Image: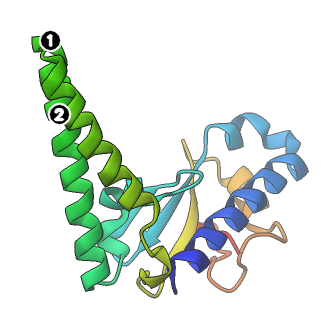
Amino acid sequence: MYWDEFCQLLVGADANFKKIKEDLSQYKTFLSKSSLYIFCGTVQIPFKRGFTTDDLKLIAEIIVPSEFRDNLLCLNEVIERFEAEQKALSKQKKSDSVKKVNERLARAKNELDTFPTQELEVEDGVTIQIIYPSIDIEAIQVIKGHRLVDQEKTCQCRACVRTFLS
């Protein structure tokens, strides 16, 4: 799947989770302590609303290796280096140097903002799962039965707590 599809998957999962919370208000406390995670193979990443290219380091493991991914990672490193330099120079009160670093940082961030994210491809098999704060089998069973939970991927047996969102 490409970046735009990945972002749509995240938006859909977030909306589904909110709807599950609304529908199952009797488990409000339990669900409010639960959270979403992105899973792909052995990689698990805390869910975040609105992933952007700034977050690439968080999700780099699920982006298919490519020239675009490598360029984006490099650009993120350049921005981090400029931000660290900016901070160090600000402490030393070197305004001319800070101005030059600010200009380079602004150019790098502009390049990041215009990066062709449509070329980024996300690994196959990405799923969004609910992670629970504790084991409450009764609550989990009710949640797993909700219509917005992926019934094909989610095992309905009581021994399994993995819950996949559709």
Comparing 42 with 163, the one in front is: 42
Q: Do the CB atoms of the residues marked 2 and 1 lie less than 8 Å apart?
A: no
Residue 95 shown left or right of residue 122 in the figure: left
Q: What count of labels does the image hold?
A: 2
Q: Nearer the viewer, mark 2 or mark 1?
A: 1
Name the mark on residue 69: none
Q: Which residue is mark 2?
A: 84
Q: Quadrant of residue 105?
A: top left
Residue shown at 12% from the left, 17% from the top: 94
Q: Which residue is mark 1?
A: 93
Comparing 116 with 1, the one in front is: 116
SS label for mark 1: loop
Residue 69, relative to residue 26: is it above or below?
Answer: below
Spot occupied by residue 145 in the image (x, y as percentages of width and height): 79, 68
Residue shown at 24% from the left, 72% from the top: 71
Mark 2 to mark 1 CA distance (whole Å): 14 Å
Is residue 163 something that shows in the picture? yes
Among the two numbered marks 2 and 1 on one chain, the one whose residue lies closer to the N terminus: 2
- The quarter of the picture where the C terminus appears is bottom right
Spot occupied by residue 103 in the image (x, y as percentages of width and height): 28, 40
Q: Amino acid at mark 2?
A: Ala
Residue 149 shown left or right of residue 56 in the figure: right
Q: Amino acid at mark 1?
A: Lys
